[in-house]
Amino acid sequence: MFVNLSRWIPVFCVFLTLSSGISSAAEDEAAPPDPAKASAAPIVPGPNDKPASTLRDAFADDFLIGVALSSRQVNGMDAASSDFAARHFSSVTAENEMKWQSLHPWPGVFNFRDADAYVEYASKHGMKLIGHALVWHSQTPDWVFEGESGKPATRDQLLARMREHIQAVAGHYKGKVKGWDVVNEALSDGGSDPLRDSPWKEIIGEDFIDHAFRFAKEADPNAELYYNDYGLEDPRKRANCVKLLRGLLDRGVPIDGVGTQSHFQLDEPSNEQVEQTIKDFAALGLKVIITELDVDVLPSYGPAGIADINRREKSDPSLNPYTGGLPAEIQQKLAQRYADLFAIYLRHRKSITRVTFWGLYDGHTWLNHFPIRGRTNHPLLFDRNFKPKPAFFEVLKLAEATAPAGDE
Ligand code: G3I
């Protein structure tokens, strides 16, 4: 590890650029720390200094730094977001547009228009495109699981539908995506069965996962194939995940990586659990990917670590305390949380191939609507005016303070 002081200049520049070009915060955000004051040493740009003023430049030697974007954020309707995201991120995931419901709403009907916009956007900005997700229990139309005369589909019917869907979708994006979340959220959050009760498992059986990966390999042999889930930092769920992944590997199922979604809170899961999760997955020889990172700062009565979209809580004003902006104390806590997380990610950058944020800025995040609709959450690095938060500077500072990969 060394600290290259000349690299502080770009950090300072990004602060100037981002904070001057954007109207001042409607929210009472604490002013970002002035990175130039972080060291007493004079800041003098070297003649060959390559500015690493954005996240994508700062982490270029470490891992892809990604973002999930909505349709409007890539198709030009929200041009401010499109440009901003392309400056900071080296990969993009479709937040909803590559899910079954969006791409294949009816038998035989495929609608690739919205998802194709991501291909264009990624190619225009030199970003890697990540496909999310081929097989999931959520956002999959009911007809997929239905058979004749109101009965459930048979195993053979459902396997045929899964294969047709994967062939069509992964086939359409062949050579255009870097990798696919092939199976999303198959594990349970409790009980004796490691797998959740989904129609996939009920109708096909536990081997639905093997089939999904094999069909994906058939459709796009060069795409990386991932298993993706949330809450894997929980020791029970993680142990079940390791067992599941080991089983896939033992049976020769084509899998390249595991995505830990990382929908976190300020205090949970612990840093130790986060790090142990990365170690346990890396020990399997799989690529480890942080696929949906955000930090929920709002209070909740429910099981905070469960990012299941079906979890809903009753609205209560006491659970929405930061509508006027994030108090400085919580802002600092968030910055520290992100600093701790990225220190771990950088320590394991040989195993981690990508860190993706689930959203670009606080103005558009699923956490404004989960588990209670219409709250004001603040989970990302950029606030509602795209202004970088203290967490952004902490993260950038860590990247800049880490030696290029070859120097280790
Ligand atoms: O597009 C419709 C719109 O036509 C309709 O008027 C509106 C009314 O509610 O709904 C719109 O659909 C919403 C969709 O997002 C697009 O905005 C759905 O209601 C809403 O449920 C859906 O939420 C998405 C959620 O997945 C669905 O499961 C979130 O945006 C998305 O961030 C979230 O992402 C998931 C990952 O895929 C998997 N891991 C967990 C993560 C967070 O839940």
Image (cartoon, grey):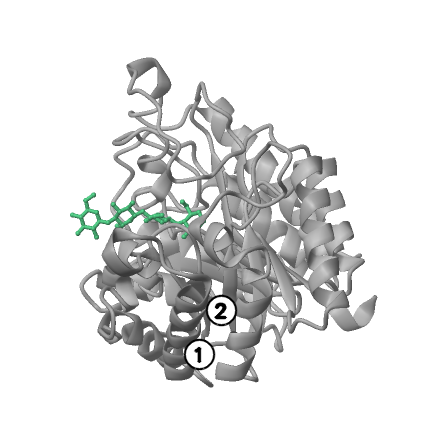
Q: Position of residue 47 (x, y in %)?
A: 61, 76
- With respect to residue 373, does 199 lie above or below? below
- With respect to residue 362, does 191 lie above or below? above
Q: Are marks 1 and 2 in contact (CB under 8 Å)?
A: yes
Residue shown at the point (59%, 36%) measured from the top left = 337
User: In this image, 328 relative to 61: left or right?
Assistant: left
- With respect to residue 143, does 263 lie above or below? above
Hey, what amino acid is under mark 2?
Ser
Residue in the foreground of this view, choosing between 170 and 299: 170
Q: Where is the C terminus found, in terms of image quarters?
A: bottom right
User: In this image, 350 relative to 6: left or right?
Assistant: right
Q: Where is the N terminus found, in terms of image quarters?
A: bottom right
Q: Position of residue 302 (x, y in %)?
A: 46, 22
Q: Which residue is mark 1?
A: 126
Residue shown at the point (48%, 30%) measured from the top left = 331
Residue in the foreground of this view, choosing between 365 and 214: 214
> What residue occupies the far left of the structure in this picture?
77
Q: Position of residue 2 (x, y in %)?
A: 78, 57
Hey, what amino acid is under mark 1?
Gly
